[in-house]
Image: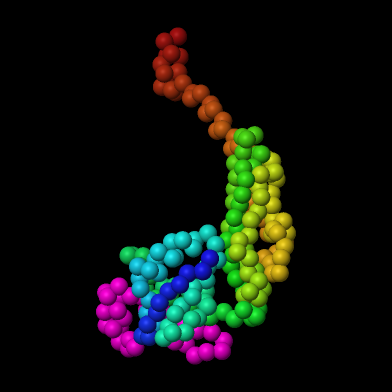
């Protein structure tokens, strides 16, 4: 998925400048890449949040337009306020189509496992896989069909679809497991009769 964002050059120096920039509805950010100097920029907070909310389940690219030039980027890092959860700063990394790079790709698990119909439950261990490939060969999505899994079955990185990319995770890393239904707690043993009552009965003899 590709999102388009307009950016403006940023000339903030002091912390108060950044505070004022954020108060105006902008997010301070930076553009950087292997063949360019870092560029301080600012993007509209509302526009970015709309894009970001749509990008949770897949790798997304951001076309940053700055002074009439477009930069093909990915969101590399972000700084979030620990209390308000507002995004305070963003790093956009420019990617070249022919460059070999490393990406984190969300896994789309599809289908309803047979094992869940048998009383089991699905335990997804890992939702993201790391790959290396040229930027132009990045898969739009990586799907893994789990409908054939029964109770006790599992799928691993080696079971993922192949393409013009290389998985960085070990082939035997488990992605999903179908567990048997948890056993109900055993009934608690009956409580023993109070010692005082037993002593009282004995004294009556």
- Percent x, y of residue 101: 63, 77
- Percent x, y of residue 176: 64, 51
Say which of 153 and 20 sits in front.
20
- Percent x, y of residue 68: 44, 84
- Which image quarter holds the C terminus? top left
Image quarter of residue 183: top right
Q: Residue at x 33, y 75 (%)?
A: 26
Q: Is residue 36 magenta?
A: yes
Q: Is residue 197 magenta?
A: no
Image quarter of residue 166: bottom right
Task: Give the number of marks.
Answer: 0
Q: Residue at x 69, y 52 (%)?
A: 155
Q: Is residue 77 left or right of residue 118?
A: left
- Percent x, y of residue 124: 59, 51
Picture colour scheme: rainbow
Q: Is residue 103 visible?
A: yes
Q: Residue at x 49, y 90 (%)?
A: 37
Q: Residue at x 30, y 75 (%)?
A: 22
Q: Is residue 56 left or right of residue 26?
A: right
Q: Is residue 80 visible?
A: no
Q: Is residue 205 left or right of residue 186?
A: left
Q: Residue furthest top?
A: 205
Stretch of the chain drawn in magenta: 11-39
Say which of 50 and 121 sits in front.
50
């Amino acid at each position: 998925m590709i999102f388009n964002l307009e950016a403006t050059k940023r000339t903030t120096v002091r912390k108060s400048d950044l505070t004022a920039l954020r108060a105006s509805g902008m997010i301070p950010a930076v553009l950087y890449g292997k063949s360019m100097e870092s560029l301080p920029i600012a993007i509209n907070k509302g526009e970015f949040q709309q894009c970001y909310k749509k990008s949770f389940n897949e790798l997304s690219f951001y076309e940053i337009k700055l002074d009439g030039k477009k930069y093909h980027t990915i969101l590399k890092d972000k700084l979030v306020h620990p209390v308000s959860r507002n995004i305070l700063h963003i790093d956009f990394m420019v990617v070249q189509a022919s460059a070999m790079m490393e990406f984190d790709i969300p896994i789309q698990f599809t289908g309803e496992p047979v094992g869940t119909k048998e009383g089991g439950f699905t335990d997804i261990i890992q939702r993201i896989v790391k790959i290396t490939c040229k930027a132009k060969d990045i898969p739009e999505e990586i799907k893994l069909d789990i409908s054939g899994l029964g109770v006790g079955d599992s799928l691993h990185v080696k079971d993922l679809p192949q393409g013009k990319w290389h998985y960085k995770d070990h082939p035997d890393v488990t992605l999903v497991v179908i567990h048997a239904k948890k056993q109900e707690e055993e009934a608690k043993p009956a409580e023993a009769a109070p010692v005082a009552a037993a002593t009282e009965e004995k004294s009556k003899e």
